[in-house]
Amino acid sequence: MSDSEARGNAESGGPVFEERPTEFIVKDAFVLGIAPLALAGLAGLLGLDWLGYVCMGLTVFVASFFRNPPRDIPGDERTVVSPADGRVIAVGDAELPDGTKVPRVGIFLSVFNVHVNRAPVAGRVVDIERDGTKFLAAFNPRVETENVRLAMTLETIFHERVRVVQITGLIARRIVCHAQIGEWIQRGTRYGLIRFGSRTDVYLPPGSELAVKKGQKVRGGSTILATLPDQSDAFDALDPVLEDPDVEDQRNGD
């Protein structure tokens, strides 16, 4: 257990999110891939080789789409990592639902990217909100307010709010979020996915220093998006918490 997780548990005493999905190929691949695989076999029996190749190619595509490789998480608890693989399509200030302007990074996921989402920071899940009714193309600016989406808000040990939004696209029609309100989630932890092409946005606290630019390719959990505002003075105030025997037991996994 990391220092940030131990601190979070010491402060709020809530449950810790159990990472999922963790399998190298997400189980959805087997559900969605069985039909084209069966058709490929049937086409082979009927001598329709061209159809068999098409169906087998589709099977391989489904398996590739749901791949879920492990990642090394860089930096420390002030480092914001990418919640998704893809390409940065928006960098700069954006408005939250309450009108507050904060730094935001928007990431477009093509059908060839890994679609498993990861937590950009360590924090307590304080809100999960589903909204939207449309399935516009992910590059359309209106997707932020109109597309079907799920916004998860994390609160760090310093009570900073980081909002990560899974957004459907023209093809993507299903969002999966395994995390629940009240759970502590560790930075870089896999917590959900979006099926078949989508977008993921991260809204950061004011004063965060962005580290990416528009057009840059990023990888979930391993690309640094930003650094949260300096909290060195607050860290000093938390040192007595880490010296608590109960916290030490948590850090050692007891």
Image (cartoon, rainbow, N blue to C red):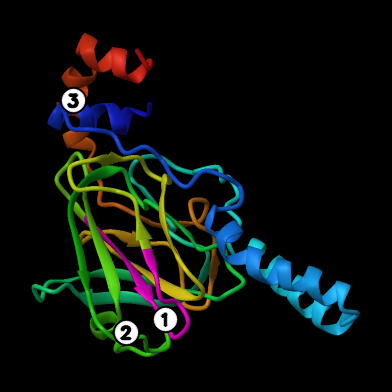
Whole-percent x, y for residue 70 in the image? 58, 45
**Marker disc for residue 60:** none
Whether residue 42 is visible to the viewer of this picture, yes or no, is yes
Q: Quick one: label 1 or label 2, which is nearer the N terminus?
A: 2
Question: Residue at coordinates 47% horizontally, 47% vertically from top-left?
Answer: 21
Tell me if 9 is positioned left or right of 40 in this view: left
* Residue bearing mark 2: 143
For the residues bearing labels 3 and 1, Cβ distance under 8 angstroms: no
Which tag is nearer the camera, tag 2 or tag 3?
A: 2
Whole-percent x, y for residue 171 in the image? 48, 82
For the residues bearing labels 2 and 3, Cβ distance under 8 angstroms: no
Question: Residue at coordinates 48% horizontally, 51% vertically from top-left?
Answer: 221
* Residue bearing mark 3: 10
Magenta stretch in the rendered image = 162-175
Question: Residue at coordinates 31% horizontally, 43% vertically from top-left?
Answer: 122
For the residues bearing labels 1 and 2, Cβ distance under 8 angstroms: yes
